[in-house]
Amino acid sequence: MATITVRVPKNIRKEMKRLKHINWSEVIRQAIAEELKKDRMKRASQKIDELRSKSKVKWDSAAVIREWRERRR
């Protein structure tokens, strides 16, 4: 594992010391992992939008669902 250093204000560090039962390294690891996940999802969404805009076929989901429902009758 790599090591990083995080700077926090003294008042926050004082509160962190008071809550010794919390594994702050794990909290920070999870927060970083969550931000990375959000970024990956955002980039994937942008890529999907980019691919959709290049598509020549325009797909209307409401029309397709309506057609499926009509076929069931």
Image (spheres, rainbow, N blue to C red):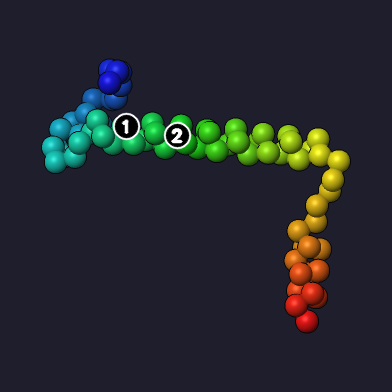
Q: Are marks 2 and 1 in contact (CB under 8 Å)?
A: no
Which sits in the foreground, 68 or 34? 68
Q: Residue 35: which disc?
A: 2
Three-letter amino acid code at the position of disc 1: Arg
Report if residue 16 is visible in the image: yes
Give the quarter of the image for residue 69.
Answer: bottom right
Residue linked to disc 1: 29
- Percent coordinates x, y for residue 58 in the rendering: 84, 48
Number of marks drawn:
2
User: Badge 1, how many Cα within 10 Å: few under 14, some, many 20+?
Assistant: few
Which sits in the foreground, 72 or 63? 72
- Percent coordinates x, y for residue 17 in the rendering: 15, 33
User: Which secondary structure lies at badge 1?
Assistant: helix
Q: Is residue 44 above or below residue 68?
A: above
Kindly identify the residue that appears in the image at 50 percent across and 37 percent down. Answer: 38
Kindly identify the residue that appears in the image at 81 percent across and 35 percent down. Answer: 54
User: Badge 2, how many Cα within 10 Å: few under 14, some, many 20+?
Assistant: few
Kindly identify the residue that appears in the image at 78 percent across and 63 percent down. Answer: 64
Give the quarter of the image for residue 8.
Answer: top left
Residues under labels 2 and 1: Cα distance?
10 Å
Q: In the picture provided, is 66 more to the left or to the right than 31?
A: right
Kindly identify the residue that appears in the image at 52 percent across and 33 percent down. Answer: 39
Q: Is residue 66 above or below residue 31?
A: below
- Percent coordinates x, y for residue 14 in the rendering: 18, 31
Give the quarter of the image for residue 73.
Answer: bottom right
Three-letter amino acid code at the position of disc 2: Glu
User: Which secondary structure lies at badge 2?
Assistant: helix
User: If the image is split into quadrants, where does the N terminus sit?
Assistant: top left
